[in-house]
């Protein structure tokens, strides 16, 4: 409390009073800005169209996980394994991922495709791992 009374005594205004005093200046600055936009609309209108177009057609990747940082988004094209895609996150808000946020990822698999390179050896290895896991779980339960 002593600091606030000392500030008032020295002639300084509180933040609330300062906001009320500066309100007419803010209104005048806003009017001047909108007058400027109105006088120079021929510059700002094309910039607005370019910005709105870029929101829908340009993707940005800020992480080093993929080779590109800026991409042109082609819509309605078929994609395959290894292609780069941009999609919107439609889940609930988790940590710093928001609904509608764009993600830029590489496709690792395609629905309906099977892994033919590994063959049956790969299947046998997975079954053996599953059996070992079940046996280990049985030992821990006893």
Image (cartoon, rainbow, N blue to C red):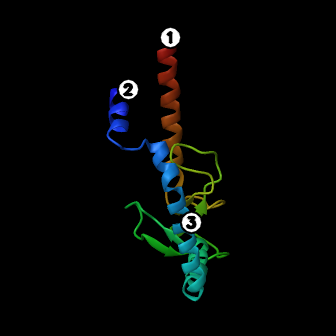
Residue in the picture at 32% in, 40% down = 10
Q: CA distance from mark 1 to mark 2?
A: 68 Å
Disc nearest the viewer among 1 and 2: 2
Quick check: 132 above or below 75?
above
The answer to which of 24 and 104 lies nearer the viewer is 24
Look at mark 2 in the image and give the residue it sits on: 1
Q: Nearer the viewer, mark 2 or mark 3?
A: 2
Q: How far apart are labels 2 and 3 at the CA level?
A: 55 Å
Q: Which residue is mark 3?
A: 86
Identify the mark at residue 61; answer none if there is no mark: none
Pointer 1 residue: 142
Q: Which class describes the residues within 10 Å of circle 3: few (<14), some (14-19), or many (20+)? A: some
Q: CA distance from mark 3 to mark 1?
A: 50 Å
Viewer-nearest of discs 3 and 1: 3
Dot placed on the residue nearer the N-terminal end, 1 or 2: 2
Q: Are marks 1 and 2 in contact (CB under 8 Å)?
A: no
Look at 37% across and 33% down and name the residue there: 4
Quarter of the image containing the N terminus?
top left
On the image, the x and y values in percent for residue 93 come to: 60, 45
Of the numbered discs 3 and 1, the one sitting upstream in the chain is: 3
Badge 1 marks a residue whose secondary structure is loop
Q: In the image, 57: left or right of 11?
A: right
**Residue 58: image x %, image y %?**
54, 74
* Secondary structure type for disc 2: loop
Q: Identify which residue is drawn at 57% across, 71% down.
A: 31
């Amino acid at each position: 409390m002593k600091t606030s009374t000392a500030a008032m005594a020295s002639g300084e205004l509180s933040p609330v009073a300062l906001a009320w005093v500066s309100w007419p200046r803010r209104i005048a600055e806003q009017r001047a800005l909108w007058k400027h936009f109105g006088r120079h609309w021929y510059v700002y209108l094309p910039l607005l169209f370019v910005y709105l177009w870029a929101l829908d057609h340009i993707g940005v990747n800020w992480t080093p996980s993929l080779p590109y940082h800026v991409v042109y988004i082609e819509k309605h094209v078929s994609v395959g394994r290894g292609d780069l895609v941009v999609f919107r996150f439609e889940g609930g808000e988790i940590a710093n991922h928001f609904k509608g946020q764009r993600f830029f990822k590489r496709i690792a698999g395609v629905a309906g495709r099977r892994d033919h390179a590994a063959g049956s050896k790969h299947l046998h290895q997975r079954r053996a791992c599953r059996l070992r896991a079940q046996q280990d779980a049985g030992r821990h339960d006893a």
